[in-house]
Amino acid sequence: MATASTQTPSKFQASLETLVAGLSNTTSVALASLMIGGISMTRTEIIAKLKAVDALILAVAQVKQAYAAAVAARKTGLVAGHLFYENVVMALKQVIGATNQAQLAAFGIFPPKPRAVPSAETKAMAKMKAAATRKARGIKGKKERASITTSPQSKLQMVTGVSPAVTSASPASTEPTQTIANPMPATTSTVPSSPGAEASSTVPKT
């Protein structure tokens, strides 16, 4: 069970208010006075002390609400405020002179700061960093993308014999595969095995 010292302000405030309500509504004679931290206090004094602590928490909550309202009002008012300020500055420049820096400085109006020009070394470093970033992310420019050409390539497979041509595509590849049969049919030849005798053997000629 959480003690009062470990409770959040909102939960502690609820505990305080409940305790105050209990002490205010009780009619017990035994609770007319209590020893609080070694000091005897009447019930009225105890209730007053508890209400004072409750008031501290309530004050913070009220300040938070007022702060939130002030922030919202500032956010809304600054839009019109910036525009009004710029109009006042423009009017002063028209009367005093946009190039009269000696008098405009008294109103806190100064010329815009010149834009800093990066050095050659800074530009080179920025270019190297950008190239390294593109390489790490795999980003390609227009010229690199234009140089990439993809076209399907045919795969040829030679099959010997007299089987008719069969076209097949490998299921593991999306590229078409063509199969061409060997147009030369198998032939046979007679080779003599010994002088004066002939033996017929079939030798496929490829």
Image (cartoon, rainbow, N blue to C red):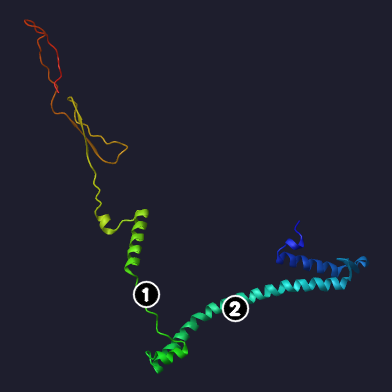
Of all residues, the one furthest to the right in this rendering is 29
Q: How many marks?
A: 2
Of all residues, the one furthest to the left in this rendering is 196
Task: Please give the residue where the numbered disc 1 appears in the rendered image.
Answer: 116
Residue at the image position 53 percent from the left and 77 percent from the top: 75
Task: Please give the residue where the numbered disc 2 appears in the rendered image.
Answer: 70
Residue 115 x, y percent position in the rendering: 37, 76
Of all residues, the one furthest to the bottom in this rendering is 95
Q: Secondary structure at mark 2?
A: helix
The quadrant in which the N terminus is found is: bottom right
Residue 69 sits in quarter: bottom right
Q: Which mark is residue 162?
A: none
Residue at the image position 23 percent from the left and 42 percent from the top: 153
Can residue 46 be seen by looking at this rendering?
Answer: yes
- Disc 2 or disc 1, which is closer to the eye? 1
Residue 194 x, y percent position in the rendering: 9, 7
Q: Residues within 10 Å of mark 2 (few under 14, many from 20)?
A: few
* Marks 2 and 1, how far apart at CA: 38 Å
The quadrant in which the C terminus is found is: top left
The three-letter amino acid code for the residue at tag 2 is Ala
- Specify which label sits upstream in the sequence, 2 or 1: 2
Residue at the image position 81 percent from the left and 69 percent from the top: 20
The three-letter amino acid code for the residue at tag 1 is Ala
Q: Secondary structure at mark 1?
A: loop
Q: Is residue 199 left or right of residue 33?
A: left
163 is higher (above) or lower (below) than 141:
above
Residue at the image position 10 percent from the left and 16 percent from the top: 189
Can residue 91 be seen by looking at this rendering?
Answer: no
Residue 2 x, y percent position in the rendering: 75, 58
Residue 92 sits in quarter: bottom left
Of all residues, the one furthest to the top in this rendering is 196
